[in-house]
Image (cartoon, rainbow, N blue to C red):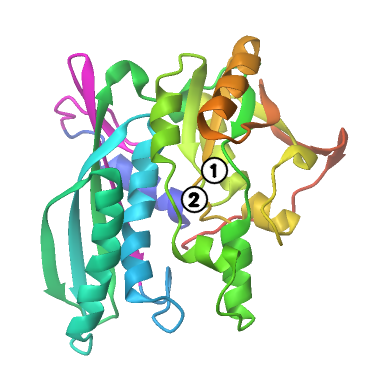
Amino acid sequence: MNEFELIAAINRYTSHLPDNGFEGIGDDCAVLPLGDEALVFTTDALSEGVHFLTATTSAIDLGHKALAVNLSDVAAMGVRPVAVLLTLSLPREVEEHWVLDFMVGFAELAQHYGVALIGGDTTRSEGGIQISVTAIGRGPLRHIKRRSAAQVGDIILVSDRLGGSAAGLRQLWEGKVQSPEIEQHRRPMPEVEVGAWLGAREEVHAMMDLSDGLKSDLRHILNASQVGAEVQVNNIPRAANTTLGDCWCGGEDYKLLLTADPRQAGILCEEFEAQFGRNLAVIGHITEQGLRWFDHHQEVSCDYEGFSHF
């Protein structure tokens, strides 16, 4: 059973439960409409030995990253994060200074985005450090972006260069200790301002963050919207020192993947550049079915696979 089969099995056992006004499973966050506004909720867990190694990740960096990956999910919904809950499960051997350093990294990023820590839990772990963060966002209901909103003919865009985090991880494996790519891997910056800005744009249809890699994450939008896509890999913006595989399937970039009305693409890209000083990159378009990859209009195969937990 892979990760998505497991999620489907969980959904089968719980789909009969009352929704109590929440939208169901399937997006970066759960959505609770409240009149003209909405609250969104997401949670992510980081497990020692799977998501990080204490030998290569400082406590300060880990505190930053644990929060960043959750704020990225909120940004992908088109609204701003407002609060978080934090759960720490720690082995006996973890020293006090490690916990304090973790909270420095966590609190610095929370302060940067004006996010409140409103609760959580602490407990002992017998299997390494385990971290779980729940993030809450808030914004106009009309700004919420869902994976299921892509339309045939939409253009596909990404908000920044891809592959930097994967390149940084590879450099760590090779014994390097510092580089811009390693910094991006250790301390990703969620696209909070970008997500809120795109959320306010009616021409933006579907959106999600890039956490598992472009190939895997684009499929989530295609499956949810019941559409296909054609992607020009030569148009994928690549970070420095990356391979095509890093950009295709490296994961943990935490940039935004979106689809938009092609008739308004020009003004969207112009105003994005004026607002953020960089380009939205058009990498393809939505079709009726299938997922095809092209390099300078020559069809190619994508043999890379994104990250899978199981």
Q: Where is residue 178 in the image (x, y as percent from the top left)?
A: 56, 75
Residue at the bottom extreme of this rendering: 93
- Determine the CA span between mark 1 and mark 2: 7 Å
Using the image, tell me which numbered label, if any, was put on residue 211: 2
Report the front residue among 103 and 147: 103
**Do tag 1 and tag 2 residues touch (Cβ < 8 Å)?**
yes
Q: What stretch is highlighted in magenta?
A: 18-47
* Residue 259 higher or lower than 70, as above or below: above
Residue name at image x 79 percent, y 41 percent: 234
- Looking at the rendered structure, the secondary structure element under dot 1 is helix
Give the quarter of the image for residue 152.
Answer: top right
Report the front residue among 265 and 39: 265
Residue bearing the label numbered 1: 217
At label 1, the amino acid type is Asp
* Residue 56 higher or lower than 259, as above or below: below
Q: Position of residue 273 (x, y in %)?
A: 59, 28
- Can residue 281 be spotted in the picture? yes
Residue name at image x 33 percent, y 36 percent: 25
- Residue 109 drawn in magenta: no
Report the front residue among 2 and 145: 145
